[in-house]
Image (spheres, grey):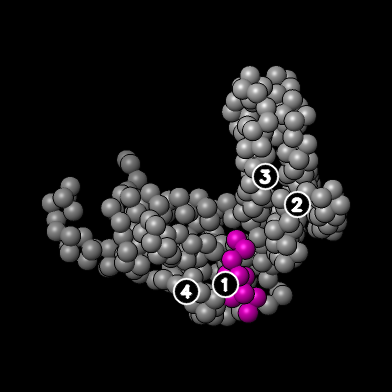
Amino acid sequence: SRKQAIGVDALQGILDRQISATIDWNPIQNLEVVGIDEIALKKGHRDFVVVVSAYINGMLQVIGLLSERTKAAVKAFFNSIPKRLRRTVKVICTDLYAGFIGAAKAVFGKRVLICADRFHIARLYRESFETLRKREWKRLQRTLTKSTLDQFKNVHWLLRHRRADLTDDERRILNRLFVHSPQIKDAHDACEALTMIYERPLSTGQGKRQIRRWMRQVSNRGIRCFDRFLGTLRTHFAEITHYFVNRQTSGFVEGLNNKLKVLKRRCYGITNLAHLYQRVCLDLNGYARFGVESI
């Protein structure tokens, strides 16, 4: 408003006349893939907003912003989607939050695949490994000499990369660490094995069998740091292995979340959901709708 020398109310009036504060379902023909996630409007306050998005005619759009992340609120939103569009939904990409999964199952049933994001799963098993690494590192600090420990400076960065991507010198450092801590080696090998299952071009059946085999191997080898993660796999096995059907991820959802975070900073905080929806629509499709072609 300052740049164009007009008041804030006048600028908001322009937005209200040009951009609706809610989705207009009428021009939309199908949804197919819907993503759902949450962001915090206020840092540290757990003031979550649920973001529901979809690709429509090849363009990413926000189809809903919800003030509550409860199952009831998400279910009510899904039910508000016109029946003709609900029938076109094929995949819902989400994390493992029970409210999102439960709402999707209640509204769409078994007809729609609920796909747990592979990168969310990767974060879970890598967090399990990181817990073990920190515990083992404290043990090594008590038992190894300073000169030996100095060989492993910044080794935690090496453990976050695939072994195939490391140099020969870096692999030698890891091998020396594994001599002192076989537990780190076993857990690191398990992480790499699970990552490779996701990377291989497996069918749905093959993916399920490989995941089950990985679970048995981890249990049989007594790699206890993954106990909680194994419980998650058993609870959400269907959602996790739906990834192998057509390899859908929540990448587009995470990208949109980053855009929303930047938008919040640009606006020095924005808590009105109607205004937030308008600004998101303007950021995503403003040039396409209102841009002037250069002569």
Q: Which element is circle 2 on?
A: helix
Q: Residue at x 74, y 43 (%)?
A: 187
Residue 115 drawn in magenta: no
Decide: few, some or many residues near mark 4? Use Cα within 10 Å; few <14, some 14-19, many ≥20: few
Of labels 4 and 3, the one closer to you: 3
Q: Which residues are magenta?
A: 95-106
Count the marks: 4
Residue 26 is labelled as 4
Determine which residue is flagged by label 1. 99
The amino acid type found where label 4 is placed reads: Asn
**Which residue matches tag 2?**
224
Residue placed at 57% from the left, 70% from the top? 100
The answer to which of marks 1 and 4 sits earlier in the sequence is 4
Q: Which residue is mark 3?
A: 132
The residue shown at (32%, 64%) is 271
Indicate which disc, 2 or 1, sits on the residue closer to the N terminus: 1
